[in-house]
Amino acid sequence: MSLPHAILTALMEKPSSGLELTRRFDRSIGYFWSATHQQIYRELGRLESEGHIRALPSDRPARGQKRSYEVLPAGRAELARWTAASQDPKPYRDALLLRLRAAAVVGGTGIEADLRRHLDLHRAQLAEYRAIEERDFPPDRVTPQDRVRHLVLRAGIDLETFWTEWLDHALTEFADLDGTGTAD
Amino acid sequence: MSLPHAILTALMEKPSSGLELTRRFDRSIGYFWSATHQQIYRELGRLESEGHIRALPSDRPARGQKRSYEVLPAGRAELARWTAASQDPKPYRDALLLRLRAAAVVGGTGIEADLRRHLDLHRAQLAEYRAIEERDFPPDRVTPQDRVRHLVLRAGIDLETFWTEWLDHALTEFADLDGTGTAD
DNA sequence: GGCACCATGTAATCAGTTACATGATTCT
DNA sequence: AGAATCATGTAACTGATTACATGGTGCC
């Protein structure tokens, strides 16, 4: 039950239409909570019917017409409640690690090319995060809000750093294995 | 489409019944691909009807009776195919980072207790992984299979290390903020 | 017989993905 | 008028979660 709260957060930061939200989910928010436009429109409908958000009065309701939303007090209260509530971490799932374990059991080195591809993707993501850090978080002018946001970005940077290092290490291991034989 | 392959991998390592698989998913495999017994039984049925696995001949089919499965050649081939196929990484989702961003916008420190709880959980997981590393991966006797498995375990250890460090850092940031005021 | 535990399932629901549909606006 | 793009949706499906149901075995 996180998507509605992701949308509430985004709308608190700045009232937006569905498409604008979609674009923002492709950038900042999507870095840790991705969503497609279909999900977003469906959820905007729910949030409105629950009284958590409302369309800006200036926007008349019509298909193909832009409709921007803002958060109502009830929505803000719900967001604060959810933020403070205790939540168990979701069970972790990682297809790449699973595939590596599978590769160990079927004895395949066919996964190597994809490891390299993932390494490139993570390197690119890391570079993007670092660019954001330089642009948006200069050492001076740090409000409490800025510090929390920087903390979140730091998690992204450190995670991508971990993956690039791990994949790099994995690839050298595989290079070794190819030399000594991998068949079961 | 990873659960069937997770089950195939587990069954390749050792033929098992549904409940035994469930227990193994609570331990080793579940560390990067969790599944409940309901999912597992459903998937075992599918895999059997597709001819990827079969019940061991010794087990007669009856409700409440143990039924162990083994992987057939077709299942092994499917697993090898899937292992070598290219797959895009799934979009990342992390509720805790989302909540932190939400906290920044509603100005709440109520999330602190849960950060501490998550820190404890990650510390415990890290300790468990390290224990497994010491028990199952002594420096000597390293077959290629062992090296790949160690690599996977290393990913788990490094990820948990990252989270404990990050959460620790986050908590000190929050301690600072409480001193200077966090309200928006 | 009653209870705990082993073992296998069914059903309902929910969140996320994929494919497709439709209207409005702007540019040529 | 046609094409591109902006903008909002519908529908079908898949995977995962939650709650519940049922039978079997061993033990007291």
Image: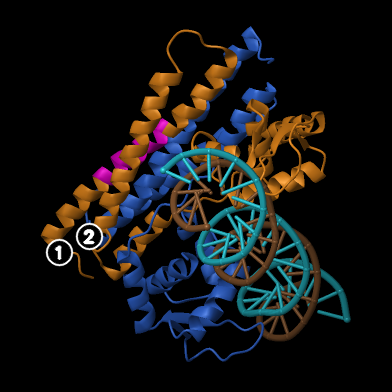
Chain colours: A orange, B blue, C cyan, D brown
Q: Secondary structure at mark 2?
A: helix
Alpha carbons under labels 2 and 1: distance apart: 8 Å
Q: Quadrant of residue A44?
A: top right
Q: Is residue B79 left or right of residue A19?
A: left
Q: Chain of mark 2?
A: B
Extreme residue in the left direction: A179
- Give percent across and percent down for residue C10: 72, 79
Packing grade of label 2 (10 A; few <14, some 14-19, many >=20) is many
Residue appearing at x 82%, y 39% in the figure: A51
Residue appearing at x 65%, y 24% in the figure: B105
User: Do labels 2 and 1 touch, CB within 8 Å?
Assistant: yes
Q: Is residue A62 left or right of residue B76?
A: right
Residue appearing at x 19%, y 64% in the figure: A182
Nearest to the observer: residue C19 or residue D26: C19
Nearest to the observer: residue A46 or residue B54: A46
Residue marked by disc 2:
B144
